[in-house]
Image (cartoon, helix red, strand yellow):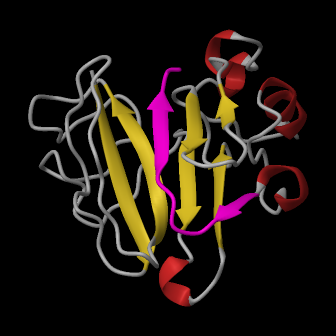
Amino acid sequence: MIWPATLTSSGGAASTTGFELASKGDSNIDVPANWSGRIWARTGCSSTGSACATGECGSTHVSCNGNGGNPPVSLVEITFAGGLNQREDFYYISLVDGFNLPVKVIPEGNCKTISCPVDINNKGCPPELVVHGKNGEYSKIFKQACPDAYSYAYDDATSTFVCHAGIDYVIEFCP
């Protein structure tokens, strides 16, 4: 069981800011055409979603109500350009705030599927970083494990992906 959550950066609210999702389950999140924001999964939450092992958002409910996920958390970030008279959406996986679950983004169109399919915590993550690391440069370890993902701020050249506007995206946790 996971508890996916959303945080809107701009463009109006998503249809939900958090919900419970059973293993192999699926759910739709409706967003405005010009939405920009983050999607992540919380793990090990209480029945109310108020206390989670990872991705905690500081809410006393299953919904995050405008709060972001506490690191370490694997993020999917998307900017839908449809309502901005743009022709392209931008999407990426970010490990800048750490890692909690493998994730995959599947655009429903002729665009690149991206993923971080490796459990970095069990595949070479330095022990001192399993929860938080305070010293050193470890972005290469994350980039080697998940080449599609942002491993440090401004890792745009190899980690930001573009697709034509107006399509849907499937986000899989633990692919």
Q: Quadrant of residue 126?
A: top right
Q: Is residue 117 left or right of residue 45?
A: right
Question: Does the stretch in magenta take in 89?
Answer: no
For the point 48% across and 58% down, the residue is 38
Q: Quadrant of residue 40?
A: top left
Q: Is residue 45 visible?
A: yes
For the point 46% across and 28% down, the residue is 173
Using the image, determine if residue 65 lies above or below residue 72. Answer: below
Using the image, determine if residue 158 lies above or below residue 86. Answer: above
For the point 51% across and 67% down, the residue is 166
As drawn, which residue projects farthest toward the front? 110
- Front-lying residue, 158 or 168: 168
As drawn, which residue projects farthest toward the top? 122
Using the image, determine if residue 171 lies above or below residue 36. Answer: above
- Front-lying residue, 7 or 86: 86
Question: Does the stretch in magenta take in 172?
Answer: yes
Helix, strand or loop: magenta stretch: strand
> Where residue 174 sits in the image (x, y, percent)?
49, 21
Q: Is residue 70 visible?
A: no
- Front-lying residue, 151 or 36: 36
Q: Which image quadrant: the N terminus?
A: top left
Q: Which residues are magenta?
A: 161-175
- Front-lying residue, 40 or 135: 40
> Where residue 113 sits in the image (x, y, percent)?
67, 38
Q: Is residue 67 left or right of residue 84?
A: left
> Where residue 141 sits in the image (x, y, percent)?
85, 28
Q: Is residue 90 left or right of residue 42?
A: right
